[in-house]
Amino acid sequence: MKNELHLIILWDENNIHEVEDTIRERFQIVKKFRIPPLGEVRVDVLNIIYRFELPVEELMSVSKGTRPTIVFVVIDENPVYELKQTSRQLKHFNINLFNLKRELRKGRSNYLHTTDNIEETHDNLKIFSEVTGDSSIYDEWNKWRLTFPIKIWMKNDIIDFNGDRYQSVGKWDIYSKGTEGEVDISTKDRYYFTGKFCRFLGSKDKDYGYKIFTSELDINLLFDIQNILSNGGFAPHPYEIMKCCDDTQEYFAIKMDNIRGIHVQPDKKWINSLVDFCNENKIYRHKSTIAKKRGWRATIEEECVPKNCIKKDDGKIYLVAIDQRYRYEKSFSYVSKSRLYKSCKKPIHECTRRRRMEW
């Protein structure tokens, strides 16, 4: 796995030299900058940093952002991720940053914060750059990000992605309803199958696979939705968004847990659990005007067909076809009033959500 860019945010400058020495023992510091008190946009910025997971009332009551903030931009040369339970939720963490945060806090609250993954790194650099008007902050992201080569040969049903060649396993009827039984498409060492809006790449010798998007979409929103479904046990865990290009255009890919397995028709119990989870987390599928006129399916339940669902070796069933028809809503009662995002109806989607298209 390649190195990762992360942030260590020090809300309190006390013992800063001790903190910096400890950071240097673990990571390479590539930039250090100071953020002035956040003033009236403080809660908005904290909401983004903490991924809208904390109540607004709690953010308003803490001291974070009321004083100057020191931010360290660091390189983790050997990132390792673990699924951990926190007081708020079960999620994947970069364990190196997690352990450093726990060590440096020493029981102190409102002292420091670290990014859990590189999606948070991107969003935090973006918002700090906007708040300060300093474009050099976000430039750290542009310096680090990589672009991966891709070549799609439609006639030969072959995709060459980052040096590996994937062969098509055949075509599905896009609008077919569920069928009985199981369908094994993992017959090649490296293979791909085509969905309505993307192509899924898998292999027998890797723990990760890819979902390649060839049309314009809010890739950050889809990453978020898949991450939520993954935490609920309904989708492969997404690791990062990758920028790809061939000779003529740019693509985006979501790197995620390997999707090799058997395509199955989930039973009613699994489908109902997925639908309940989506309703609870305000995830739904958008139905376009054309789809309404032609009677195409749009509900999440109707998407639970073998083409979109894979049973892995451990017996877990995952929804893999999370495409641009999916939507995710949250309450932004405070943030929507912010002057920082006054032009955005859903600021977290439009302004700084994970790994924006401008990557």
Image: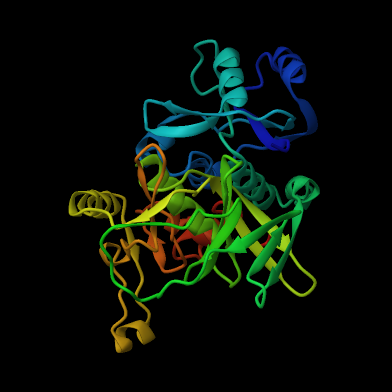
Residue 25: % across, % down: 76, 15
Choose between 208 and 90: the one closer to the eye.
208
- Quadrant of the rendering where the C terminus is positioned: bottom right
Residue 147: % across, % down: 76, 55
Q: Quadrant of residue 207?
A: top right
Choose between 3 and 306: the one closer to the eye.
306
1 lies above or below 271: above
In the image as oriented, which residue stretches furthest toward the bottom? 293
Q: Is residue 95 left or right of residue 128?
A: left
Residue 299: % across, % down: 28, 68
In the image as oriented, which residue stretches furthest toward the front? 187
Figure label count: 0
Question: What residue is at 66 percent from the left and 78 percent from the top?
Answer: 155
Q: Is residue 221 left or right of residue 178?
A: right
Q: Quadrant of residue 27?
A: top right
Choose between 260 and 221: the one closer to the eye.
260
